[in-house]
Image (spheres, rainbow, N blue to C red):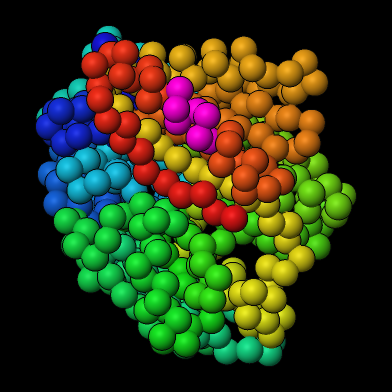
Amino acid sequence: MRKLFGTAGIRGRYLKEITPELAYSIGLAVATYVGRGSIAVGGDGRLTTPVLKLAAAVGLMAAGADVADVGLIPLPTLAWYVSRHALSAGIYITASHNPPTDNGIKVFKSDGMEFLISDEEKIEEILAEENWRLADWNSVGTYDVISGAVSKYLEELSSKLAPVKKKKIPKVLIDSANGAASLTTPKLLKNLGAEVVSINSNIDGRFPGRYPEPRPDVLEPFIPVARDLGADVYLAHDGDGDRLAVVNPKTGFIKQDRIIALAAKYKLSLGKGKVVVSIDCGNAVREVVESLGGELIIVRLGKVHEGLARYSDAVIAAEPWKLIDPSWGPWIDGIYQAGLIIKLMMEEGKDISSLMSDIPNYPQARYSIRVPKEYKGSLYEALKEYLLSKAPESAEVLTIDGVRINYEDKSWVLVRMSGTEPKVRIYGEAQTVKQLEDIIGDLLRKAREYLKSKGIGELEFEGKLIP
């Protein structure tokens, strides 16, 4: 049986990697693993989500678990619901920022944290051996449709983030990507007292407004809209609301490392502790954390919750686009993140430029090479070996997730395989744009040469270099 769980749950093309039969089996396995009890199911707005959600619910009930169907809600709201109602687990149907053809499955523990690698391995063992327990006729699970989860989540989150003072009333353009956060973030920001304009806020699983990944190149066409509206900040979600991108209408996309550094600065001002971040984070985070007496912990991409589970004194855990504040809950929450940024703007009386003014800023690039699935692994290995062969002795080599080379001059480059798509990622940072262009251009040339040797003529990639 193929390995199912990747960087972030199970994800893939509907009817190819992700099928109703798989969702049913996941339901059986999860109920068997957690010992039945009550388990929440929910999902995003993709067209295939209801099919997969109900298939998973049937599996849960067949194994004796009671199902609480919270419906179409953002991913963070399902995690919150599981935690606040002390359920045994939660299953959420989503492909996050993937295209509308895809879907996937994420599983949450009773405290709202995503399943750990050890939990995922147990689920895969049950699936491989079909070692699930089917309930007899008189002990199958019940099925209840739950209403009001979103409104109660918003009520608690609005109270949590309520500004102590309001020195500024920011005007916010919020872009929900036609996704599930349309139900929450515009209302949350209004509750906090901001002036809100929303776009792409009608839920549509075809994502007609824009591609659901809030990358710089995807959001760029909307920046003039934010500027013309006189917005102080432009915030953009992915399809299920766990990701958030932040854009300055005057200067453009704000690097995710700097947003993480801003959150770390705020949390470390309240108390010292560890800051858990993924391997693709840059120097801005390290410099801010160390300057404030915090300790930086580096983990695999997609597994920052694993680091949070290991370090009880972590004040935040984050990776680009995603933030966990354990004082709110151990789940990634882009809705919370949006509210926190607006809270800080209000309390400090600053626009987004001023709020970010003391956060270091280095040129950074994030590229993804599209590659036929059968060549993803071999292309990665070719780029990895090339990087290692060129690395000077003075460089630091990290291999906890792909291969990252940290050079003496603080520049770095990371190459890794996507855990969710047929792509190889290239991330990097340098002191100057020219230096970064040379680093990334060299790797793209190597990738082009390798693919050409396999009969693939065109190098297809997406992404952007941000000065």
Residue 259 in sight here: yes
Q: Nearer the viewer, residue 43 or 388?
A: 388
Rendered residue at 51%/62% (across/down) = 253
Q: Nearer the viewer, residue 112 or 334?
A: 334
Span highlighted in magenta in the image: 440-446
Q: Nearer the viewer, residue 12 or 422?
A: 422
Residue 66 in sight here: no
Q: Quadrant of residue 298?
A: top right
Q: Nearer the viewer, residue 57 or 441?
A: 441
Residue 444 forms part of the magenta stretch: yes
The quarter in which the C terminus is drawn is: bottom right
Residue 463 forms part of the magenta stretch: no
Position of 320 relative to 182 (above/below): above
**Is 170 left, or right, of 94 in this rendering?**
right
Position of 231 relative to 35 (above/below): below
Rendered residue at 66%/26% (across/down) = 405
Q: Quadrant of residue 310?
A: top right
**Is 16 left, or right, of 340 in this rendering?**
left
The x, y position of residue 87, in whole percent, is 41, 46
Total marks in image = 0
Q: Quadrant of residue 131?
A: top left
The x, y position of residue 154, in whole percent, is 44, 71
The x, y position of residue 6, in whole percent, is 39, 28
Rendered residue at 73%/30% (across/down) = 407
Instruction: Identify the main secondary structure in magenta.
Output: helix
The quarter in which the N terminus is drawn is: top left
Rendered residue at 68%/68% (across/down) = 356
